[in-house]
Image (cartoon, rainbow, N blue to C red):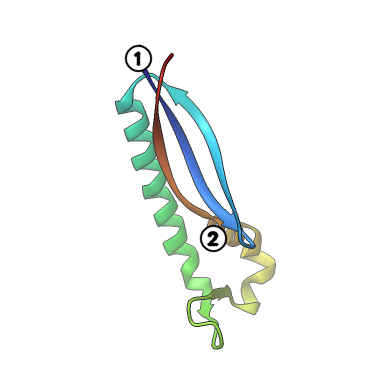
Amino acid sequence: MDKVYLVKYCGSSYGDYYEITIFATAKKTTATKYVTKFNRILKKWKDYYSQFEYRHVELTDFNWIKDEYVDKYYDRWSSLQNVTKCYYEEVPMR
């Protein structure tokens, strides 16, 4: 085993960038499959929750949850908005 693949996801919350390591594996295929599945599911849920959003008038690149959905969907919507993507990083073994 000469390489390890660190599977991570990244995002930001209030301007603070973060990376979270989910797991490490010696198999590139395992890392690739996980990343693909994670990103597919992330997109699915972001698309679903986008129906509860509106585009902020003053900030054109800024979506926010509609007032009538805050109590029911805000926590999950906010969590999903913070996650950008999943990826893997190849690290050589010493």
| Residue 12 image offset from top left, x and y in percent | 57, 56
Q: Which residue is mark 1?
A: 2
Marks 1 and 2, how far apart at CA? 36 Å
**Quick one: which residue is furthest to the left in this view?**
29
Considering only vertical position in the picture, is 92 above or below 75? above
State the quadrant of the N terminus.
Answer: top left
Secondary structure under the numbered disc 2 in the rendered image: helix
**Quick one: which residue is furthest to the front in this view?**
94
User: Quick one: 36 or 69, which is closer to the camera?
Assistant: 36
The residue that appears at 50% across and 28% down in the rendered structure is: 23
Give the quarter of the image for residue 30: top left
Tell me the crowding category of disc 1: few under 14, some 14 to 19, or many 20 or more residues within 10 angstroms, Cα based.
few
Amino acid, disc 2? Gln
Amino acid, disc 1? Asp
| Residue 62 image offset from top left, x and y in percent | 53, 75
Q: Which residue is mark 2?
A: 81
